Amino acid sequence: MEVFEGFKDFKLTQIQTSDPEVKINLRYGGNGPPILLIHGNPLTHVHWHLVAPRLAKNYTVVVTDLRGYGDSSKPRGREDHSNYTFRRMGQDQIDVMAALGFDKFCVAGHDRGARTAFRMALDHPEKILKFASFDILPTHHLLTHATYQWAMHSSHWFFMAQAYDIPEKLIEGKYDYYIKQKLTKLGIGKGGFTEATLREYARVCTAENIHAVCEDYRAAVTLDMEMDTADFKAGRKIQCPTAVYWGEQSHTEKHFDPLKAWPQYAADIRRIKPLPCGHYPAEQVPDMVFEEINAFFSY
């Protein structure tokens, strides 16, 4: 594992969740009100290494690896993919924060981490004080407004979601190639990574990780979409104060209108704006991400 200077004062540990098969890998440090930062695909908690240490001056910061990612447990997917839904991933994060002594906290998520946090805010409104989303549209909106132009830039959504074990076998033995292309060339808004972070993301890209990612995407287009559709039809929205950010060079900006989409899913949006970056704000414009999170979570 690469040693990242920003995390030198953070404690590295693993916490058993309410799922006997899963321990979550994490770092935590700092002092003050608790905040949780959750990464996306195909990343790890390292995604926040330029942001978390600065936040730790004012907050107790927890950065985790989602189940299936990084050094967290990677259970085999169930037939219905239910152990990789955002609801189950969100419960892992609730379990982690409870084990650390935090019953209520703020959460920021990027990509899959933002989708996990979105579900946490709906399922656990008494625990999530504020929610900041980075470069997603809610899953229901994304899939019901998908175009072929977006699909060309986001083909992994449907490739990874194909039946077991077709995508797993097609990527097998090509993990280094896959991770480099995924992060630097496949789609739009890519790049902005250091050699150290690319090595770390390549280190944890294994057969078990790829299977978990596939299960994540299989769950997203089935059970997660069903949950989100039911909530949308019932008029259920996130009630906590919400901040929404996205990259000007990402698929979110190019193929959707976040200003129109997000108010359909969140009742109390306090900040909603694009950032001058692509799909990975915390590594492409870390100073701005720090400033936004710090300002939003502080009031």
Image: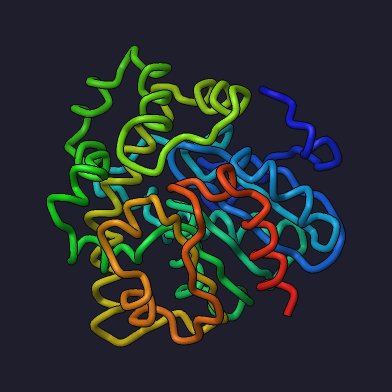
| Foreground residue among 22 and 40 | 40
Which residue of the protein is positioned furthest toward the front in this rendering? 276
Classify residue 46 by image quadrant.
Answer: top right
Q: Give the vertical position of 138 relative to 182 (above or below).
A: below
Q: At 26% from the left edge and 37% from the top edge, which residue is drawn? A: 160
Q: Give the vertical position of 12 relative to 60 (above or below).
A: above
Q: Is residue 239 left or right of residue 100?
A: left
Q: At 17% from the left edge and 50% from the top edge, which residue is drawn? A: 149
Disc tally is 0
Q: Is residue 35 left or right of residue 260?
A: right
Which residue of the protein is positioned furthest toward the top in this rendering? 173
**Residue 19 coordinates in the image, percent (x, y):** 52, 49
Q: Is residue 130 left or right of residue 136?
A: right
Q: Give the vertical position of 208 relative to 149 (above or below).
A: above
Q: At 36% from the left edge and 25% from the top edge, which residue is drawn? A: 181
Which residue of the protein is positioned furthest toward the left in this rendering? 148
**Residue 107 coordinates in the image, percent (x, y):** 61, 64
Q: Give the vertical position of 225 relative to 82 (above or below).
A: below
**Residue 79 coordinates in the image, percent (x, y):** 25, 43
